[in-house]
Amino acid sequence: MPLKRTPFQEVTNAAATALNHTHVPVPLEKLWSSPVIKRSKKRRRVDENGDNNPRVDHSKEPQIENTASSSTATVTPQPAAPRWTDASNFTALKLASTRVNRPRYHPVSTLPILQSLVSSHKHDVYRIHSTNPRRTFDLPTCAVFSHGSRLGRESLFAVTTEEGRVEIINAAVKQEWALEPVRKSFPSHHGAVFDVRWSQDDKKLATASGDQQSCIMDVDTSAIVARFSKAHHSSVKQLQWDPYNPNLLASGGRDGSICFWDLRERKTKEDDLEDSDPDYKHTHTPTGIIHGAHGDKKEGRSTKFGQSTAPSITSILYGKQCDGRLYSSCSADGIIKLWDLRQSGQQSTDTELRASFESSPDFTTGSPSISSSSSRARGIVSLTLTPCGSVIYALSSGSQIHSYSALTLSIPESSCAPPMTLSDARLRVNSFYVRMAVSPCGNWLASGSSGGDVFLWEIGGSSWTTRGTAITKPVVLHFTENSGETTCVDWGADGMLVTGSDDGTIRTWRPDSARAAQFRDDFEGTRWNWAVATS
């Protein structure tokens, strides 16, 4: 007599044992009837009435018989049904494969990590002494972690000052009463240094200064190995390394131009340079210049002498998803431009290079922090990219942060939805020196402010609504009442953050949930030694 029908796995094992471990092909329809797989209500109704289903033929299933005259069971295998009888079977397989129990991904909020950031007034505060006898400390203008620090290999960051100095500080955790490691200093500029960038191998530093020059410095020897001059006619605001070529850089100036540099191209005697210049062998000429990148003098600002200047370049960024892409912003409006540097315009100053994409419309004209009677555009203060390079964030002078698709500079969501916007009533941006940065993990965004506080947002997948607004309020890092404007922010590894304010202090922050809980329990006793994040 035939044995009782068993589930799919038991039938296969019994048949394999009877045939001396020889596997017998089982029709695919046997899998659908197995209780191992969850089936929909429609599928269960079809299985209960097997005769009405033309695709299931139980007569062709292998029959396992147990005869009294034989000590072993005999199996009569039948030809297996084809895997795909028609298109509906293929659709059923796809549906069944998605109904198998699988672990679902539920985004976990990382907001508690931001709320646990603490900073010691004794071990996490750094100052740079001024050479000016009228003041004690120099004001920091930019602080950037090295690439190794962003990966967790070290804790080094470079700091630039208003007097033109550059120093490298080791922010590793120190023992109690331990002395600070010796800092490394570099030759100073003749003006304030507005930007500093590490090379990809962390062996060189690139600086942009108000003396209309940019320098490349060797980290080990502290010597200047390259100098970019006589290209910008005003202060150099930003400098960026090309992530795909260690010899290429781009700089943006207050004169509205973007210059491109190649460390392999040096100046010659025919370039109007005196042989008496001590930096002759280190001076380079630009390989390309984009004059008036964001408009001519008519669209710029007017000086006190009545002269018009082109809109100042406030930020430039190299793209991470494709070689030869550069983003730029200006102080006149909220338009971001994307330049394709593979065009011939990069190799010649006579050929005009046009932007491939422009962000449109200008969302800074609709900022809620601006009075309704005024609809003029607000400039973009800072740009930053996510680690994967897919989303670009723009901090406007209207005290809002907008996000765009890095590929086309459009809204990341559908065209009918507003852009993803980060804002807070306490966030004030009154100058073009405020910076923002995205963490190496891509979950957090930090922004300085003119009020002195630092605002931290969670920008992960679970922190947005369907309409592009932040679900949670930002975490605020509050310093002192007279801290001045906070302009320097940058992320290191494991949630480490560095900030710099106009009170002359550079401060590092680290997540410490135990210390943060102690601060909330004993506010009066802890606030004299620690600074803790607040909501």
Image: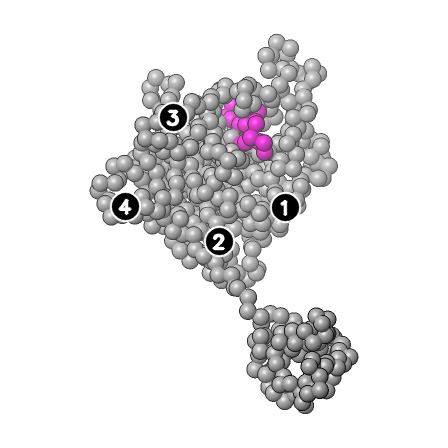
Badge 1 crowding class, 10 Å Cα cut-off, few under 14, some 14 to 19, many 20 or more, is: few
Task: Provide the secondary structure element on which disc 1 rests.
Answer: loop
Of marks 1 and 3, which one's residue comes earlier in the chain? 3
Look at discs 3 and 2 and give the one toward the viewer: 3
Badge 4 or badge 1: first in the primary sequence = 1
Label 4 – label 1 distance at C-alpha: 44 Å
From mark 1 to mark 3, how far is it between C-alphas?
A: 39 Å
Among the two numbered marks 1 and 2 on one chain, the one whose residue lies closer to the N terminus: 1
Instruction: Please name the residue shown 41% across and 46% down the image.
Output: 456
Residue 439, placed above or below residue 111: above
Asked whether disc 1 touches disc 2, contact meaning CB atoms under 8 Å apart, the reply is no
Give the residues drawn in magenta, as a range: 197-217
Residue in the foreground of this view, choosing between 505 and 227: 505
Kindly check if marks 3 and 2 are in contact, taking CB atoms under 8 A apart as contact.
no
Position of 425 with respect to 217 (left or right) is left
As shown in the figure, which amino acid type bears the numbered disc 2?
Gly
Colour scheme: one colour
